[in-house]
Image (cartoon, rainbow, N blue to C red):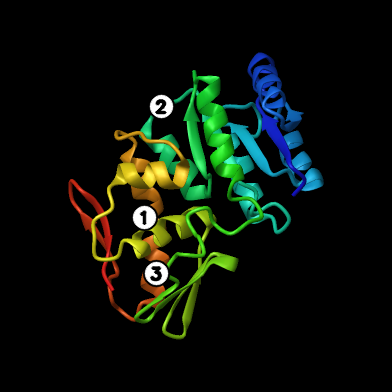
Amino acid sequence: MNNQILVVDDDISINELIKINLELAGYKVLQAYDGVKGFALAKQEVPSLVVLDVMMPDVDGFTVAKRIRENSVTKDIPILMLTALSQLNDKVNGFNIGVDDYLVKPFEIEELLVRVRALLKRTNQIPKSASVRDLLTLGEITLLPENYSVQINDKIAKLTPIEYDIFNILFQNHGNTVSSSKLLKDVWGYSEDDDVETIRVHIRHLRSKIDKISGGKKYIETIYGGGYKLNI
């Protein structure tokens, strides 16, 4: 990746607004005004982040995101999806495809920049929730931060950077309930108490991967009204 941000939005005024503010914040910016060109640029330039609109003619943002995730060259690029739609299904669809974060139009530029910074922290480095003081092994579980993986006994699950960050926070707080708001703050860098669906979707994907290597043990417990807990 080359420290560039690709903005894909067919609304020229919004595309330009995002470009100007990203450049003022010190980022290099590439632009595309349709999904076909956007995916082509993603493959050609392999940017550090894609800011992707949902509603575009011909090829929509969901299709572009799916193609990015399925392509071996672009599959690890963080995606921040923009949409004028606030329906829950659109957010869930994006997260199921592999979108990293989601921002509903209209949005404040500062909020966009906060989410961009949080996503870029995960690019080409050890997950931001990890540190040299973190516990890496407990019982049958070992964290492998260098490749975003978790090992349980002799089996390994490869996680996305976000899934790894979530699991690591639960791991460091094993036996204790971690609230959704804390996960939002520590993983995404912001706190939205009403955005619990963001956490639910990622926990569901994370839980399915962990359950496949757990030997039947259910490690991640949902604490209704409270958050989540890792039982070891």
In the rendered image, residue 196, in percent from the top left (x then y), is placed at 31, 41
Residue 164 visible to an observer of this rendering: yes
Q: Earlier in the sequence, mark 1 or mark 2?
A: 2
Residue 83 visible to an observer of this rendering: no
The residue carrying mark 3 is 210
Residue 87 vs residue 131, the one in the foreground: 131
The Cα–Cα distance between marks 1 and 2, rounded to whole angstroms, is 21 Å
How packed is label 2: few (under 14 Cα within 10 Å), some, or many (20 or more)? few
67 sits to left or right of 114: right
Against 187, residue 149 (above or below) is below
Q: Residue at x 59, y 67 (%)?
A: 146
220 sits to left or right of 212: left
Look at the numbered disc 1 and give the secondary structure of its residue: helix
The residue carrying mark 1 is 203
Mark sitting on residue 153: none
In the rendered structure, which amino acid carries the disc numbered 3?
Ile
Residue that extends furthest to the front in the rendered view of this protein: 133
Look at the numbered disc 3 and give the secondary structure of its residue: helix
In the rendered image, residue 167, in percent from the top left (x then y), is placed at 40, 61
In the rendered structure, which amino acid carries the disc numbered 1?
Ile
In the rendered image, residue 68, in percent from the top left (x then y), is placed at 65, 48
Residue 77 vs residue 127, the one in the foreground: 127
Q: Earlier in the sequence, mark 3 or mark 2?
A: 2
**Residue 218's quadrant in the figure?**
bottom left
Against 96, residue 26 (above or below) is above
